């Protein structure tokens, strides 16, 4: 059913191309992204540089490949962290109910009402602009949606007959949560986790654009931020990494829609 969704297939093909460019491209075109190789702001296609050079004369192709590795890796790691936190909170809230659910949901709402970008900026400002801190900051502020989705699924599944049968067989709570209920609650969680990768990439780009990232590491947001004072003189140096972020998030969103169609039992019955 996923492959019958043409938009999802197009998103998958686009994402595969971006991944090949970022992770296999350096093998075909090696180079130091920080090396100044030509005069600043050479336009795309001139002097043998496919995408031109930035304000320091660095090759934008090399910057895009190195930046893609960092941006995508941070997106995946931050999304994984958010899923772990969200699943843990949502699973215990949905399974136990009562006071446990009340306390965990109020805890979730506290994080949900905080301005996420501002909160992540505060975390990075307090603990330093390293890749680990940026990843943790994004993960800490992005888990609430996963928690709510997981809780809703647990509330629905915990009353089904196979769970009641497992409970009658003296299965322990942790076994019921992680071995019985969670596998059956995974489809919407997988879809949400996929979409969170795109959100995490956008978060990282925003933090890097504001200068709240490791200056010794290249990312797409960092390329945009470093070239923004010259956007009127050489807009391509900002537009190219911006388009890379746009197409990556678009591809991930299309894949998420396709996964939702494929994993949603109501849609499968149509």
Image (cartoon, grey):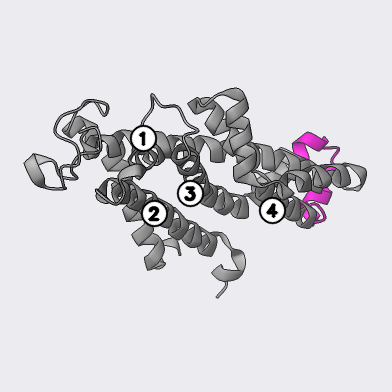
Secondary structure of residue under mark 2:
helix
Comparing labels 1 and 4, the label whose residue is closer to the camera:
1
Comparing labels 2 and 3, the label whose residue is closer to the camera:
2
* Front-lying residue, 211 or 90: 211
Q: Name the residue under label 4.
A: 149
Q: Name the residue under label 2.
A: 246
Q: Residue at image x 63%, y 45%? A: 116
Q: Position of residue 198 (x, y in %)?
A: 48, 49
Looking at the rendering, which quadrant does residue 81 occupy? Answer: top right
Secondary structure of residue under mark 1:
helix
| Vertical side of 26 occupied by 106: above or below | below
Q: Residue at image x 28%, y 35%? A: 63
> Which contiguous range is marked in magenta?
158-176
Q: Mark 1 points at which residue?
A: 69
Q: Confirm or deny contact between disc 3 and disc 1 (CB under 8 A).
A: no
Comparing labels 1 and 2, the label whose residue is closer to the camera:
2
Q: Position of residue 118 (x, y in %)?
A: 62, 42
CA separation in Å, label 3 and label 4? 18 Å
CA separation in Å, label 1 and label 4? 30 Å
* Front-lying residue, 16 or 239: 239
Q: Confirm or deny contact between disc 3 and disc 4 (CB under 8 A).
A: no
């Amino acid at each position: 059913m996923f492959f019958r969704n043409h938009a999802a297939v197009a998103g998958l093909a686009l994402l595969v191309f971006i991944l090949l460019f970022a992770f296999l491209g350096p093998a075909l075109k090696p180079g130091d992204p920080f090396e100044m190789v030509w005069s600043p702001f050479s336009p795309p296609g001139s002097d043998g540089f496919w995408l031109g050079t930035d304000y320091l004369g660095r090759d934008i192709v090399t910057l895009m490949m190195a930046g893609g590795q960092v941006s995508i890796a941070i997106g995946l790691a931050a999304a994984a962290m958010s899923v772990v936190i969200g699943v843990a909170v949502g699973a215990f809230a949905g399974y136990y109910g009562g006071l446990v659910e009340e306390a965990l949901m109020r805890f979730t709402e506290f994080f949900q009402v905080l301005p996420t970008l501002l909160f992540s900026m505060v975390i990075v400002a307090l603990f330093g602009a390293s890749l680990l801190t940026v990843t943790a900051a994004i993960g800490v502020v992005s888990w609430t949606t996963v928690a709510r989705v997981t809780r809703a699924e647990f509330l629905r599944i915990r009353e089904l007959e196979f769970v009641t049968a497992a409970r009658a067989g003296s299965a322990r709570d942790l076994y019921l949560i992680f071995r019985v209920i969670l596998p059956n609650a995974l489809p919407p969680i997988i879809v949400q986790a996929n979409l969170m990768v795109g959100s995490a990439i956008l978060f990282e780009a925003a933090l890097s654009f504001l200068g709240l990232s490791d200056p010794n590491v290249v990312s797409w947001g960092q390329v945009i931020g470093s070239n923004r004072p010259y956007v009127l003189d050489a807009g391509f140096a900002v537009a190219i990494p911006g388009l890379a972020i746009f197409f990556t998030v678009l591809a991930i969103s299309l894949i998420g829609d396709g996964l939702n169609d494929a994993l949603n039992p109501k849609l499968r019955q149509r």
